[in-house]
Amino acid sequence: MKSCAEKIVRILEEAGFRHVFGHPGEQILPLYDALRKSDIQHVLMRHEQGAVHAADGYARASGGPGLCVATGGPGALNLVMGAAAANIDSVPLLMITGDLPESGSDHGRFQEVDTSGVFGPVTMKTTTPSGGDEALSAVMDAIETLKGRGGVIHINIPRDVLESDAGRVRRQPIKSRGFPDLKAALRLLKSAERPLILAGGGVVWAGASEELRAFAGKLGIPVVTTYSARGVIPEDHPLCLGMAGTRGTPAGNYAAGKCDVLLVLGARLSDRTLAAIGNPRIIHVNLDRDVLRGDVMLEMDVRDFLKQDIRRTPPVEWLRELEACRNARPAPYEEEFMVEGEFRTSLAVRGILEAAPDAIIVNDAGSHTTWVTLCRKVLRERSLIFSGGFGPMGYGLPAAVGASLAEPHEDVVLIAGDGGFQMTMQELGTVAELGLPVTMCILNNSRLDVIRQWQEMKYGESYGVELKNPDFVKLAGAYGIGAVGVESYDDLSDSLEMALASREPFLLDIKVGEEDIPLPDHRTP
């Protein structure tokens, strides 16, 4: 009879997983032995934090669930921050950790920790199966749950359970759902004079972008998006007003503030989104009942809602009002920019985006993040990747690994600050080993610039933000990765073109000056 670990790997294969990101350790070795004989490609990351960020980036780029594994104790705990980052953005992610054997359960054992207790607050679900059959059922149920729905599911499996014989999979019965408020939602939407659709990441995970565009076009309802849903309707589409909320476009925030009925599809209505919303009646559609709020709440798949037969006259006057607003206050990515003055972050970011208009952009956290958000016109979903709800520094490089493996024929460009890059720069080893054609752009100003700005605004001066950086070009060279230094806008375009054309790993060390980011309309850092 096959072991539990072997049967888990078989289940993962049948579910369509092709890559797993991880780092081996003693308590997870039975699963690694099963992976050794599997067609699933294991991607050895240099740190468990890199593994979970890579699985996150893989999921965001592919539109399907990501998978990462780690051993117990320290290995598992190194996943925690990345789990929180993925979960808050509703990224579908399955995490499997090994643990100490259940036998010999005396406390005080080496590397013992209440893993499920730690992961409970930062995941959609965490469980520790007590036997092989229970472990198989947990994996199957997790895969079923992640179909069309985002969130992190963590399964912590003791080593002796992984080694045990496993029999049948006991599936939980699927509960049928009724939608008693569906007719009320459709009536409310038909009655609106100033309707607006707010599309969230749930539209991406449901694979419902095409249905969204058809629905909005048929009814003539304008659309705004959250950060994670940018591109589900191209930002040059006549009905797209861009992002709403903190860092939203002027037209997007105007519409959110003035609409009388807001149809929320697959968004959790975070504080950054709510900052722009006025006092409309809200129809909220989401598979996660815990985030539902508003006047009419529907626990259902957004794709099912968008298939409803509804007819109404397009709100012509409302559309004219919004078009006038968009013409009077265009989004920053619609404005021309002048190449002048000191070579600073904003100019470097615009140069990168201009030189790589069709690339998947993976964005790390830092002062450059704001400029990428403002200046990138997103024309297709899953082409701008960033951990927007949690914003951890160090996310970018491992996420770019995942994105490149998910979309091997796409150009992948990482934009990172010097501070964030150094938090996970050990993953240069993974990039080099796999020969991934990731172009890594480091905005190097030798400081944590956005923190400097907030400190100076609040306290009058900065402290603890100056960086003594390594020579990033030599560092890349030590890994066998090509690299150049860039000190002017004129050099940037040629260097980036060379890097992209090589289809090999390449690093650009871009020296920029100090610069404040513009304050958002709705003031949160």
Image (cartoon, rainbow, N blue to C red):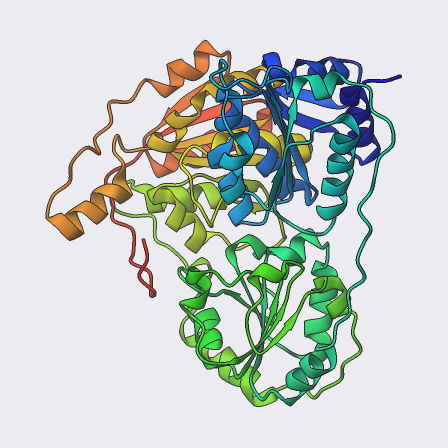
Please report the residue visible at 60 percent of the width from the left and 72 percent of the height from the top: 239
Q: Is residue 314 visible?
A: no
- Looking at the image, the residue that sits furthest to the front is 106
Residue 336's spot in the image, x, y percent? Answer: 41, 58
Please report the residue visible at 45 percent of the width from the left and 41 percent of the height from the top: 352
Q: Is residue 439 visible?
A: yes
Observer-nearest of 56 and 334 = 56
Residue 441's spot in the image, x, y percent? Answer: 44, 32
Residue 270's spot in the image, x, y percent? Answer: 47, 60
Position of the N terminus by quadrant: top right
Observer-nearest of 457 and 271 = 271
Observer-nearest of 500 and 461 = 461
Vertical comparison of 134 with 86: above or below: above
Vertical comparison of 138 with 253: above or below: above
Residue 227's spot in the image, x, y percent? Answer: 51, 55
Total numbered badges shown on the rendered structure: 0
Please report the residue visible at 64 percent of the width from the left and 89 percent of the height from the top: 191
Vertical comparison of 205 with 289: above or below: above
Snapshot quadrant of residue 127: top right
Vertical comparison of 119 with 7: above or below: below
Observer-nearest of 208 and 179 = 179
